[in-house]
Each structure stands twice: as structure tokens, then as C-alpha cells.
Amino acid sequence: MTKNKLLLVDGNSVAFRAFFALHNSLERFKNNNGLHTNAIYAFNNMFENVMAKEEPTHVLVAFDAGKTTFRNAWYDEYKGGRAKTPGEFKEQMPYIRELITGLGVKHYELDNYEADDIIGTLANKVDKELFDVVILTGDRDLTQLATDEIKVDITVKGVSDIESYTPAHIAEKYDGLTPLQIIDMKGLAGDASDNIPGVTKIGEKTAIKLLKQYGSVEGIYEHIDEMKQSKMKENLINDRELAFLSKKLATINIDSPVDIAIDELKYEGKDLEKLIPFYKEMNFKTFLEKLNVVDDTKDMDDILFEVVEQTSPEMFEEHAAFYVETLGDNYHIEDIVGVAWGTKDKIYVSNNDAIFEDEAFQAWLFDEQKTKTVYDAKSTEVLLNRYIGRPKGLVFDVLLAAYLLDTNDTNNDIAGVAEHYGYSDIQSDDAIYGRGAKKGLPEEEEVFFGHLARKVKAIGWLTDKLKEELEAKGQTALFDEMEFPLSKILAEMEITGIRVDALRLNQMKGEFAERLQEIEQRVYDQAGEEFNLNSPKQLGVILFEKMGLPVIKKTKTGYSTAVDVLEQLKAQAPIVEDILTYRQIAKIQSTYVEGLLKMIQADGKIHTRYVQTLTQTGRLSSVDPNLQNIPIRLEEGRKIREAFVPRKENWVIYSSDYSQIELRVLAHISDDEHLKAAFIEGQDIHSSTAMRVFGIEKAEDVTPNMRRQAKAVNFGIVYGISDYGLSQNLGISRKEAQQYIDTYFERYPGVKEYMENVVREAKDKGYVETLYHRRRYLPDINSRNFNVRSFAERTAINSPIQGSAADILKIAMIELTKRLKEEKLEATMLLQVHDELVFEVPEHELEQLDQLVREVMENAVTLHVPLITDSSWGKTWYDAK
């Protein structure tokens, strides 16, 4: 018999999480009446995600009835001291209840009780032979309810990141504790978010240690006399009453007087009669589209446009919005299916390729004085170059500007960007063209032409709005002087492409196939039998049952054979090292050798796409194919670069990259005297750090292992590493790792001060900035959840460093492009790979290029420490390293 599934949602907790998931977009999420809608919008997304994942048969959303409950009678300060709830959140709560009703779900609250108590009571009330239970919450208090039939899903970040708590997961996370012992843990350690006091100076780690030994709060006090004298024992004795009170406060009441029957919670689907008007009132056009409903609160027919087969000069103004449409992402191979241009007064659209041959169209397109605002300038340039040549007069890029203003919003669909800024007179591409295999032009041409016209109108509307916001945030120069000029350079690099030797790749394919076969046979010999090496299940049986290796982690389907598990086992059996090598080479074979062969175009080159609007630090990404991820730590991976060659005989590949640029940026930003001195004096930075951290006076006394450890500390500090992270990297205890970190901060006080300052500023402002005012918003920087907040703090530390390093390379790329033209060199910039730039150059220009690249890159900006580059060259990209 198929079991039912009951979904119980902690309404207040999930709504609060939803509010902060889109908090940095608070002022953009408003309906026509000025109501903030960010929490309503994100709550809908969270709810839809969990409904699709769990497919429950019965659903209830429980809410707290008020601020006081029966627990306040026990302890007046329960949940006291909480920050005042933002008015922007409170105003949305009634509408969230209205949304829930429209979604076809009951909501319920009970005077004097919390939502937790309602959920706990219903979760335990249902017949477990008939029901599985899923609880959705943002509050870890509810994990105490987990059983084999009750799963507790905790929202970790945003609207889709969920951590599932089962008894097994709780045992793994809390060192063997059971769900019910979570209550005892809170009795001892307290809970700051609920103002549960706990025992003085006892934190979560100590509480877990005590519970593993004594089982419960009661067990601890039964054996209190046996404990050796210590400050902890003294605190336990003094706070005995608080410990039992805290446990009582933390215990969910699973026998609350809930007067709702399970049958009343049967889910029958959405109540569209209520949901559709609600979505319209909230201006949730995306949700309406998913219901196949056109929002008739907007006049979607008021746009004026003219479909043209050919053009004439009067169709082109001095300034216009311009858009070129394709149906796929890879504009190097996709066909143009339509173009549109115009102003708010008149828009023209066409799907006739012959229009590119029109004299009037070409005159306008190539006229620098006829300025054009576009959506994604780079793709526009590359696409049109394949048809008639690169356009001129592009002056503003809506996509690029929107990305700079909020790097958290990576929705590259023009309708998504428009909606983000309160413009809703356009539907998404998915609504017009469909998705996946069904994607295509709509049957009615009028719908397609109207969509193109609306894109042009949206580009025009967004331009002034985005320019104003760039100015207000001090980011105009970042757009005008860095990102927009760079988009033209990237377009040139993409159009040029890099030549690839297909014969060499095919040769490698054969070599790697032989190597894989050898490793496979060696694994079979050690295992004593043949099996499917690519099957984690079969591999798990061999390693953990037949060979008896220790089980480190289990999954739902059996033993984990993930890389992190195998790394821990490789010292115990040679077979594990072989399996890891096999996997690495197999990935190189499929992803890079075979993958690159498929991407070589008719001109014998690969034309990667640089995504300028993806990362939150400003680094470029490479796709179709990704040339930044070729695994160069492994010799087989490095060999892939042998296939990348210059376009002509007597030319070479030239490579130059910044030496330790992120650490140099850290020295500049932190202004730490010792870190600066090491770079200014040209010391080996890792040896210098080793000397300071390990108290060594002479550089020659630094051992290779000390330097390795210092290197891990240096780069760990840049990424805000924890003692746990460093201990894993170095294979040492957490105590030793923490000692390294503490010593580092003693020796480099400026770095410590920078980290404290940047986190404090991030908490105040909600964002951090690079040296060039690139912003990264951190919606979780003030989260009550320790792990979520800690990640945001580490991000706050790293983003200005990594982002400034990315900015410096971009500045260098812009200046290099200018100088190459001024000096009339044939040398061409081909690739950017993080801190590395790759060129092809005639041999007779090599010396001149080397001098120019060093000069420009090392003087791109002025820091408190020198910038240094490492350069090399050769007949292939492999030889240039």
C-alpha cells in the first residue's frame, strides 16, 4: 500500500527566512499599492520547491498565535531580547496567509502555543503505518522531532538550499546524539535566539561531550558528585535549576490541544479562483505565466511596432534601443531569428535575414555617431560579426549594468532583469519560446514580433533607471571605464578564437584509453575480480566488504566512494590511489579530450564564451568549452594544453600571469607592515610567513614542509579559513591549526584588523566592495544561524581581495589592448585564465611583446606593494608553462 505523506510547514520561520532571502531586493519587490512583496514572493518559491520535491498528500502551515505562550509563565524572558521585527516583514504576514489559502493549503494557529507545538503534536498524532511526515522549517529546534518516519527539512540559505535532518544525519552532525538529546543539548548550552539561558560557559561542544557520557541532563546531575572538581562542575551545580528549566523550555509539546483532523489537511490542488487574483494583485507575473495565465492587469497589447522586410533611413534615430534574438545560448553557432530597434515612440521588428544587406540598416549599424543601447553587448557584437561585421556606436549594456548593481541576481533573462526593477510589461523567454526539447518560435508570428518589440521597449526603459542607480552607488566608472570596454575586448578575443591541433587531441585520446585500460587491469588484479569500476555500488562492495577497508560515510544506496572518502583511505591500500587516478584521467578524457574535439569549429579553432555577468567577485567564467578549468595539477591534464597552438608557422604562444596577486592585494588592503615588507623586499612570501609563524630566524632553516604549511595558512587566511578547514588541508589537529592561525594574526596584526573591520562594515552596510567599487551583497551576514553567518563573514573577508585582483587584471587587459594597437603589433590576446593572459605572437615580436606585457601588467595600478608577473612562451600553450 502506498503511504500518505504529511507536510507540516513552520509558517513564521519559513516566512522570516523568505524575507531575508530577498532582503537586498526589498525596495524592488513592491506591488502597485506600495506593499513590500519580497517575503511573499520567496515564500511562494520555497513552498513550490518543497511541494514538487515531496509531493505530499496532506499539508498544513502552522503559525505562532502571538508573542506569549505557556512557556512565558515558566520563564518571563523566554524569546526576550529579540530585535524588533521589521515593519516591512510584518506588513506581508497577512498576505502570506492569503497566499497559502490560494495555494489550496490550510493554515492554523493555537492560542498560548507555538507553531512548533502544533507541528510536534500533528507529526506524532498521525498513524505512522499510513503516513510519512516531512517538516519544513528554518528553526533547528524542530530537529528533536526527527524519527524514521519524520524528516525535518531545514532551510539553510535562500529559497532552495535545504538540509534534511533524520536520526542518522543528527548522529553524524552532533557526534552520535539522538534527536531527543537535542533537547538536552539546549538545556545545557541554551539557545540565544530563543533566549533560553542554559548553563554558564557551556557551549554546544561541551554539551555534546557531557551527553555522550551521561545521556541526558538528568543523567549528568545523577553523576555530578563523581565529576572531578572544575569550573564546569561548579557552573553545573550553580545553574542546576536553569538547566532543567532550559530543557523544559526547549521541549516541544507533542500533546497540544490541536483541534484539527488529519483528514481536513488533504491536499486537493491550488484554488485558482483565489490564487490568480492574488498573484495579479501582487504583480507576480512569473507565477501567472507558470499557470499559463496572462496578467490582464497590464495592457499587453498597447505596444506599437511595425514589422519590416526592408529598411529606409527614416527608420533610424540618433539614439535607439537595439536587440538581436537567438534561441540558444552559444551565439558562436546560433542563428539570428529576429532583430528589433527603436525608441519609445516607434519600434521596428524583422525576421528577414536580407535586412542585413540593406544599405540603410548597415549605414546605421556601422555609424559610431548613431548610438545604440543593447542587452548583452558582447553577444550582439559576436553575432552580428558572423553576419555583416561588428556594430559601432554601442554605448550602454543593460545586462552588464544590472549585474554590477546586484551580483546575487544572476537571472540573465531580460524579463527577469526588468521585473527586478519594477518593469513588468514583458514576458519571459520561457513563456514565449518554451523550454528544452519543446523550445521554438511561437506559431503566431505576431506573438514573436510583439515579444521582440517589448524587449526593445524594456531596454529603453531600463537604461535611465540603471544609469541613475550606477551613479547613486558610485559605480559609473566601474561600468564606463572597466566592464563595458572589457566586453568589447572579450568579443574580439572570442571572435579570434584559438587554434587547436585535432590530430594531437586524437593521439591523446588513444594514449589515455591505453592508460585507463592499464589502471583498470591493475585494480582488478588487486581486487581479485572484475567489476564495473564506474559503479559506486560495486566499488563500495569491493572496498568495504571484500577488502575490509574502514567505512567512513554511508549514503542512501550504500557506501560512499566520493573523492573525499577515497582521499582518506588512499594511504591504507594502493588500490584506492589507482581508483582516484582512474577517475581523474577518465574525466580528462571525456570532458577535455573528447569534449574539445566536439567544439572545434570549421576554422580549426575553439571559440570559448566568456561570461562576464556570472561570478559575484567579478572573475570571468569560460563556457562552451570551459578553458579555465583544464586540470593542470595532473600531468595528463597539463598535456591537454599541448593541443593549443598559434595560428601560423614561426609564431609562438606567450603566457603571463600575476605572481600571488591576491596576497599582494591583501597586503595593500590590510596595510600590514610585515606583509608589505616581505613583498617590497622581494622575499619568498611563504618562506617569510613560515619564519614569522614558526619563529625561525634564517630563511635557509625553513623546511619544505614548513613552507607548505605556511602556504596553506597564507591562502587560507585570504579565504577566511577556519581551524577545521586548515586542519583538513594540512592533516593536523584543529588545536594545532588554530594555533597557526592565532600566531599568524599575532605576527600580522594589520591582517587581523582588516578582517575584523571588513566584517563589521559588512554587518552595517549589508555589502562589501573591491578597490574599484564592485559590490557584493551579503544577505546572510547578520543571520542568526552560526554556520550561515560564518560563511557570509568568510565571504566578506575574501570578496574584496579576490574581486580587486580580478579588477586589476581587467584594467591590465584594457591597457594592453590599447598599447598593442598603438604599437601596431600583430600579437593577439587570445585567452584569460584567472590571473593568466595568453597571447599568440610572431617570433620577431616576442621580445617587444614580453617587455610590453610586463610593463603594463606590473604598472596597471599602484599598490603599496609591487605587482610581479611570470612570463613564458613556446610552440604550444603547454610549452609556455
Image (cartoon, grey):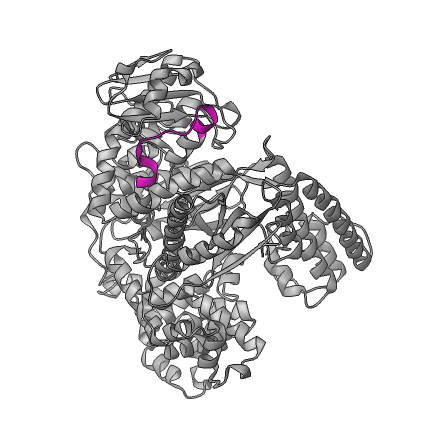
Image coordinates of residue 44 in percent, x first then y, are 34, 38
Question: Is residue 103 part of the magenta span, yes or no?
Answer: no
The residue closer to the viewer here, 132 or 416, is 416
Image coordinates of residue 672 in percent, x first then y, are 34, 73
**Quarter occupied by residue 325:** top left
Image quadrant where one finds the C terminus? bottom right
Question: Is residue 391 part of the magenta span, yes or no?
Answer: yes
Q: Is residue 821 visible?
A: yes
Residue drawn at 26 percent across, 61 percent down = 761
Q: Up-down: is 828 above or below 228? A: above
Q: Is residue 56 visible?
A: no
Q: State the extent of the magenta-drawn residues as a range.
A: 383-402
Image quadrant where one finds the N terminus? top right
Q: Up-down: is 627 above or below 286? A: below
The residue closer to the viewer here, 757 or 645, is 645
Q: Is residue 271 left or right of residue 89?
A: right
